[in-house]
Image (cartoon, grey):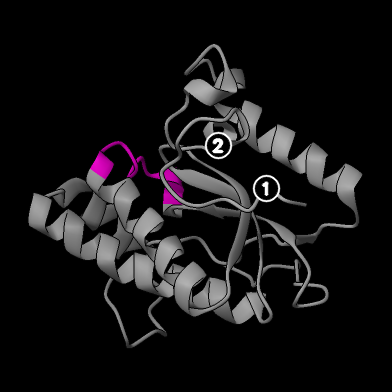
Amino acid sequence: MARTRYHFAEHDRPHFLTDTVVEWLPVFTRPETAQVLFDSWTWLQANAGLRLYGFVLLENHLHAVAQASDLPGVWQRFKSFTAKRLIEVLETAGARQLLDRMAFAFKAQRGDRTHQFWQEGSHPQAIEGEEMLRQKLEYIHWNPVKRGFVDEPEYWRWSSARVYAGRAGVVEVFTDW
């Protein structure tokens, strides 16, 4: 697969990001797989300056608006750690079919692993103001509704829409923008 044509603009600006599991495999169907992402974001918020403005996690991809002083580096750490940890979770659960597909998708030139978890790139788009931030958050929050999973954005458990609606969320979200 060719490298993505998308690049991070100014590294310290908020960006809209999309990350997809290889072959759109439905990995995030159990709380334990989703929790790997939430734990990683929580750690990166406390230790690497990650600021998460919003997110949604669906069965095979995520969207987020995030910011850090070195967002490309922080996001690479997020993808690398979660890929390794999620492969471990899938191995423990005996998810052979998913693991076989990820092994098939593996890039032969990489010697540090045996599976490809995430598709290459995160398709970063720099947020160019409050209007664009609102538009991206609306897109993120309405994604599960448009797919027919819930009737209202805040009903989707794995979304920051809950926080913006005044409810408890699964991970801290920066809403004072």
Pick the front one: 123 or 17 = 17
Q: Which mark is residue 163?
A: 2
Whether tag 1 and tag 2 are in contact, CB under 8 A, the answer is yes
Magenta range is 23-31
Q: Position of residue 121 (x, y in %)?
A: 60, 66
Q: Residue furthest top?
A: 151
Residue 16 percent location from the top left of the image: 71, 54
Does residue 53 lie above or below 15 as drawn?
above
Q: Amino acid at mark 1?
A: Thr
Q: Earlier in the sequence, mark 1 or mark 2?
A: 2
Furthest residue in direction bottom, as rendered: 111
Q: Is residue 4 left or right of residue 59?
A: right
Residue drawn at (26%, 41%) of the image: 31
Which residue is painted at 82% across and 76% down in the image? Answer: 10
Specify the quadrant that holds the N terminus.
bottom right
Which secondary structure, mark 2?
helix
Return the mark for residue 99. Answer: none
